[in-house]
Structures are given as C-alpha cells and as structure tokens.
Image: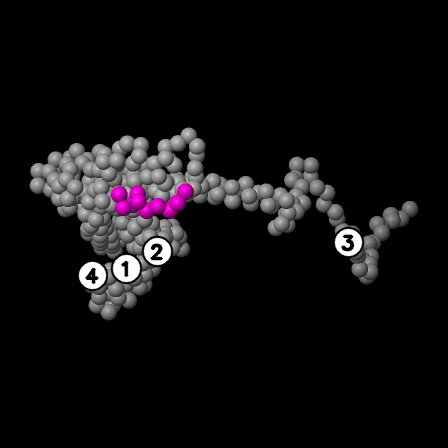
C-alpha cells in the first residue's frame, strides 16, 4: 500500500472576518459610576445649601458686629431714664444732642482729638515708611543674614505687645518721654505685620520691571518709589489702614505713659469722662463720647476698605 501524503492546506482567497471580542468585566474591576444629577439653581436643595452655608453665617456675623454699635448710637440720644429702666426701650423718645454737648464740655475733648490726630498721623506715616523700606530690603537687596532677620520679624508677630510694656515704660520714662506725644509714638514705630505683608507681595512682582529700570540706571531709591510702590498701592493702603486703626484705638500704652489731660488721646479721654460721669445718669454721655471716638476711624475705614481685600490677596497669588 502506498503511503498517503497529508492533505495540503490551500489558503482561501475569501476575506476572513474576525468576530468582535467582548471583554467581560472582571469581578474586582470598579464599575463606572453614573454622573450625579446637578441640582437646578432654584431647586430646593440648592436654596437650602446656599442659605445654610452662606447667608445665615453672614447675617449672624453682621448682627454680632453691628448690633452693639447700633445700641451705642441709639443710647447716645437717650435720657438717663430711658437707659436705666426695667422697661426696655430700643428707640429714643427724641434725637436729643444734649449728651454730645455734655461729653465735649465735661472733658477737653478737642485736646484729646488733636492729640489722637497727631499720634495717629505721625505714628502711622513712620510705620508705613519703615515697613516699605524693610520689605524692599528683604526682597531686592542682597546682604548677609537676610533670612535670619525675616525669621526674627515673624517671631515678633507671635510675641504679645503686653510683654514689652514694662521695658518700654522704663526706657521711655528714663528718656523723659512721660506725658509727651513722642513718648506715645516711639515704642510702636516698628510694624512686623506690615513688613511681612509687603514682603510677601513684593515677592510676587515680576523681576523684569526692575531689570528694565536697572538697565536705565535707576538706583534702589528710584526703583522703590517710582516702580515698586505705585504697583503695590493696594497692599500699601492695606498696611496704612490697619496701622491707622491700631494707632487711633490704642489704649493700654497711652494710659500708662500719660496721666495729664494735655497729652491724653481719645480712648484714654473716655476713661476720664467715665470717672466724671460714673453714676447711672452718665451712660448716655459715655455712649456719646464713644460715638465721637469711633466716627472718624469709621470714615477712614469706609474710604479705604476697598483696598483691604485686594491688598491681602495680592501676596497670596503666585505663578
């Protein structure tokens, strides 16, 4: 018998169609999640979330800040019988300015206002200028131990001001600064907060603006006041506003270093007014005096408050 050769496989000219392979999901493979429906802007869920997380905390915070001020203003127009009473009266019976006239004549209010104006203007100006110069040096000037100095400034932010009251009193009194305006101004001329805020903002400025000025032959002084300060106006205004408010409302140090009405500031003058009108009939006069103290600084704050948000956020945005 002859051996049969294996059958030859003849390739087919017909195109072969590969059947699609369906990948079955593995048991441990995570399944795709269906997209969650987005609530409509005026839906009940969206309105509740907006009220609970936005408007309610905002309204409560506003009431906590505003209601004491409103009560102080209303009480400044009330007579003693309307304040010291068991029947609560929110609105005064009439807008009587007698309390304001009594407050301004009982103590030398004009002298207090002039002292506060001098202390606030001189102290705030020197503080802001020193903060600008220090922040510029820490960013744009090369000198040894620059980072160490910045760390010391951060440490100064953490030290309470009350710690330095006794050393400052001994130093200023020894220099003859008791009962003087310069004795009130001198210990607080350094501002760690202003230096820190301006430094953080100066770090965000592009180096190209200073390189162009340096090519033109501008020195540090010209670069600072003609380039850096104009483009950093919101941050400088924020430091100035915070410094003005702090100087105007400062109470502890002027109370310690002065004991004469000729050199007292407005917050300390309120203490003198309280000693003169300490009985129950003087609450309206004290409220009128407090209104006279805070109105000037509220006007300054209202004029400059638009710079606060811009100034505080400029140094936090990089890239």
User: Dots 4 and 1: beta carbons under 8 Å?
Assistant: no
Q: Using the image as rendered, state which of residue 35 and residue 68 is in the foreground.
A: 68
Q: Which residue is mark 2?
A: 303
Tell which tag, 3 or 2, sits nearer the viewer: 2
User: In this rendering, does residue 249 appear at all?
Assistant: no
Q: Few, some or many C-alpha atoms within 10 Å of disc 1 (few <14, some 14-19, many ≥20)?
A: some
Tell which tag, 2 or 1, sits nearer the viewer: 2
Q: Using the image as rendered, state which of residue 40 and residue 113 is in the foreground.
A: 113
Tell which tag, 4 or 3, sits nearer the viewer: 4
Range of the magenta residues?
93-102
Q: Which residue is mark 1?
A: 229
Mark on residue 137?
Answer: none
Q: Position of residue 107 (x, y in %)?
A: 21, 42
Label 1, secondary structure: give it: helix
Q: Which residue is mark 4?
A: 221
Q: Using the image as rendered, state which of residue 114 and residue 241 is in the foreground.
A: 114
Looking at marks 4 and 1 on the same chain, the residue that comes earlier in the sequence is marked by: 4
Q: CA distance from mark 3 to mark 1?
A: 73 Å
């Amino acid at each position: 018998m002859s051996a049969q050769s294996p059958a030859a496989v003849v390739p087919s000219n017909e195109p072969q169609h590969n059947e699609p392979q369906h990948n079955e999901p593995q048991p441990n493979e995570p399944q795709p999640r269906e997209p969650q429906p987005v609530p409509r802007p005026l839906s009940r869920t969206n309105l509740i979330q907006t009220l609970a997380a936005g408007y309610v905390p905002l309204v409560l915070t506003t009431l906590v800040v505003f209601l004491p001020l409103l009560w102080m203003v209303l009480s400044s127009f009330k007579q003693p019988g309307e304040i010291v009473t068991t029947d609560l009266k929110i609105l005064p019976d009439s807008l009587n300015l007698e309390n304001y006239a009594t407050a301004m004549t009982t103590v030398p209010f004009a002298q207090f206002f002039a002292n506060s104006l001098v202390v606030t203007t001189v102290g705030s100006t020197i503080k802001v200028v020193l903060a600008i110069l220090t922040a510029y040096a820490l960013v744009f000037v090369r000198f040894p131990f620059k980072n160490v100095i910045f760390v010391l400034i951060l440490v100064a932010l953490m030290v309470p001001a009350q710690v330095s009251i006794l050393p400052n009193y001994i130093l200023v009194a020894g220099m003859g600064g008791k009962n003087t305006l310069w004795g009130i101004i001198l210990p607080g001329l350094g501002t760690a907060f202003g230096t820190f805020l301006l430094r953080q903002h100066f770090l965000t400025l592009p180096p190209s603006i200073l390189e162009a000025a340096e090519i033109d032959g501008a020195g540090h002084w010209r670069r600072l006041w003609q380039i850096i300060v104009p483009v950093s106006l919101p941050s400088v205004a924020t430091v100035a506003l915070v410094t003005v408010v702090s100087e105007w409302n400062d109470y502890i140090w002027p109370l310690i270093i002065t004991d004469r009405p000729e050199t007292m500031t407005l917050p300390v003058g309120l203490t003198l007014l309280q000693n003169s009108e300490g009985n129950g009939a003087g609450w309206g006069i004290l409220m009128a005096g407090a209104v006279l103290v805070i109105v000037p600084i509220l006007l300054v704050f209202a004029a400059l408050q638009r710079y606060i948000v811009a100034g505080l956020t400029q140094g936090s945005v990089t890239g």
